[in-house]
Image (cartoon, rainbow, N blue to C red):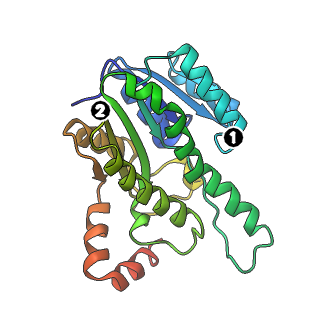
């Protein structure tokens, strides 16, 4: 079913895919709450969407994350949808980067640990309300890694694995565990240099919403469907193709 009459938390909703999600869910009359590290970006998002509820928070920071959850529980007890969208990546060479371990910690904290923490802390509130959903945003790179994303691939692959486990563990509960695997999307995440194959953010989110309305639980967007099949049939070719793209 389509998500409506819901209270939705979307991490990383100040730009890109997250902001488009906020817009589309608000168009359906939902209450949408988003967080970001950057207060400036949150203010700009709120200028575009005046009814968007914003909260400055670095979800990689355990204390800030805990405060965010408590604030939600007090102010929005009817929360029933959590979308773990926020993510970061570093384009680095493992052997030659002197700060590689610090970047590892930051990426894992943001891309993997924070979503798991938010799920654990918000689960009691989510499960009390109707049409509860936990939606984890990952990538087609969980199937085939791209070599310049040294840790991003691994963090998202771990979240992919965790999502599958969580779905099985909670299969008897009244909550949907959904994963959305996006391809390259033309957003500010690419710092003004999106790959040629990147699709429009509007198309990416439209396809996501359509699949959610059809109660699909593992949603492969656009060419991720092809990448999934190719990774099973010809993994070496898939790896070569992914890493030859500009």
Measure how far apart labels 2 and 1 are at the Cα level. Answer: 28 Å
- Name, please, the residue furthest toward the left: 214
Based on the displayed image, in which of its 4 quarters is residue 24 positioned? top left
Secondary structure of residue under mark 2? loop
- Name, please, the residue furthest toward the bottom: 236
Up-down: is 236 above or below 91? below
Residue 56 in sight:
no
Of label 2 and label 1, which has the lower sequence position? 1
Up-down: is 57 above or below 72? below
User: Residue 62: which disc?
Assistant: 1
User: In the image, residue 80 lies at what x, y percent?
Assistant: 40, 26
Secondary structure of residue under mark 1? helix
Q: Nearer the viewer, residue 50 or 115?
A: 115
Q: Nearer the viewer, residue 57 or 159?
A: 159
Q: Residues within 10 Å of mark 2 (few under 14, many from 20)?
A: some
Q: Nearer the viewer, residue 1 or 176?
A: 176
């Amino acid at each position: 079913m389509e998500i409506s009459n819901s209270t939705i938390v979307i991490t990383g909703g100040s730009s890109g895919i997250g902001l488009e999600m906020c817009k589309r869910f608000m168009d359906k009359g939902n209450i949408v709450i988003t967080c970001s590290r950057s207060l400036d970006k949150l203010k700009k998002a709120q200028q575009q969407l005046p009814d968007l509820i914003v909260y400055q928070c670095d979800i990689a920071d355990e204390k800030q994350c805990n405060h965010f959850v408590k604030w939600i529980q007090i102010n929005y007890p009817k929360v029933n949808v959590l979308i773990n969208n926020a993510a970061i990546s570093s384009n680095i060479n493992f052997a030659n980067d002197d700060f590689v371990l610090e970047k590892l910690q930051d990426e894992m904290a943001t891309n993997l640990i924070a979503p798991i923490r938010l799920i654990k802390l918000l689960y009691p509130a989510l499960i009390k309300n109707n049409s509860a959903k936990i939606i984890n945003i990952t990538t087609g790179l969980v199937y085939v890694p791209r070599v310049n994303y040294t840790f991003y691939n691994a963090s998202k692959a771990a979240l992919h694995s965790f999502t599958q486990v969580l779905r099985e563990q909670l299969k008897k509960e009244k909550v949907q565990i959904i994963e959305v695997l996006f391809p390259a999307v033309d957003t500010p995440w690419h710092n003004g240099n999106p790959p040629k194959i990147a699709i429009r953010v509007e198309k990416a989110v439209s396809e996501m919403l359509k699949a959610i309305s059809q109660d699909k639980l593992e949603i492969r967007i656009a060419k991720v469907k092809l990448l999934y099949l190719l990774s099973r049939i010809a993994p070496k070719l898939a790896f070569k193709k992914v890493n030859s793209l500009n």
